[in-house]
Image (cartoon, grey):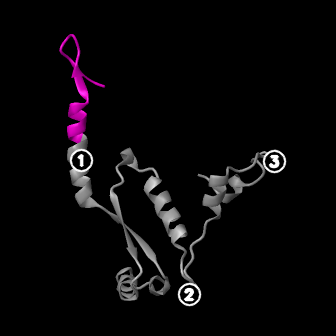
Amino acid sequence: MINNKSMGSENDDGTQRGEMNDVIKQLTERKSVRVFTDRDIDESIVSDILLAAVNAPTAGNQQLYTILRISDPDILAQLAESCDHQPFIAKGKLVLLFCADCLNMSSRRRFWCSDIRQSSRKTEKNRSVPI
């Protein structure tokens, strides 16, 4: 089990540890924000976030999710209620809602199975082997 102490600058035996990888450092220092300003969100920031999201690794790179971009105050208020009565959701300017895409799952599964069948070839001994 990894704890914050093991991510510090010293090993368990007291010897100095190298610099923490920037990605690991950002992951361990992240925080949730539930208080928002009334400031508009720059479109380039939203684009960067969405670009990072769609390029994030997923199992088999299937990306079996849909991202809903919600900024309508009425819909945000309804979302706040439906998400276990969390009022901070309604106070944001924008919510990116990540939903498991079950319809996409079943269509991708058919494609994946079909692709597997197409990606085999016959050898001289008439055996089917993956390419």
* Nearer to us in this view, 27 or 56: 56
Where residue 61 appears, as percent x and y from the top left, is 38, 47
Q: Earlier in the sequence, mark 2 or mark 1?
A: 2
Q: Position of residue 125 (x, y in %)?
A: 20, 11
- In the foreground, 16 or 105: 105
N-terminal of the pair, mark 2 or mark 3, is: 3
Image point 40% across, 85% down: which residue? 85
Name the element at disc 2: loop
The numbered dot on residue 95 is none
Identify the residue under disc 2. 38
Residue 101 is inside the magenta segment: no
Q: Mark 2 to mark 3: distance in Å?
A: 47 Å
- Looking at the picture, which amino acid does disc 2 mark? Asp
Dividing the image into 4 quarters, which one contains the C terminus? Answer: top left
**Residue that protrudes farthest toward the right in the picture:** 15
Q: Nearer the viewer, residue 39 or 56?
A: 39
Q: Residues within 10 Å of mark 3 (few under 14, many from 20)?
A: few
> Which residues are the magenta region?
113-131
Q: Residue tagged by mark 1?
A: 109
Residue at image x 50%, y 69%? 46
Is there a contact, CB below 8 Å, between mark 2 and mark 3? no
Q: Please, what secondary structure does the residue beneath circle 1 have?
A: helix
Q: Is 127 above or below relative to 22?
A: above
- Which residue bears the numbered disc 3? 14
- Residue 36: image quadrant is bottom right
Q: Is residue 125 magenta?
A: yes
Q: Disc 2 to disc 1, how far (Cα)? A: 43 Å
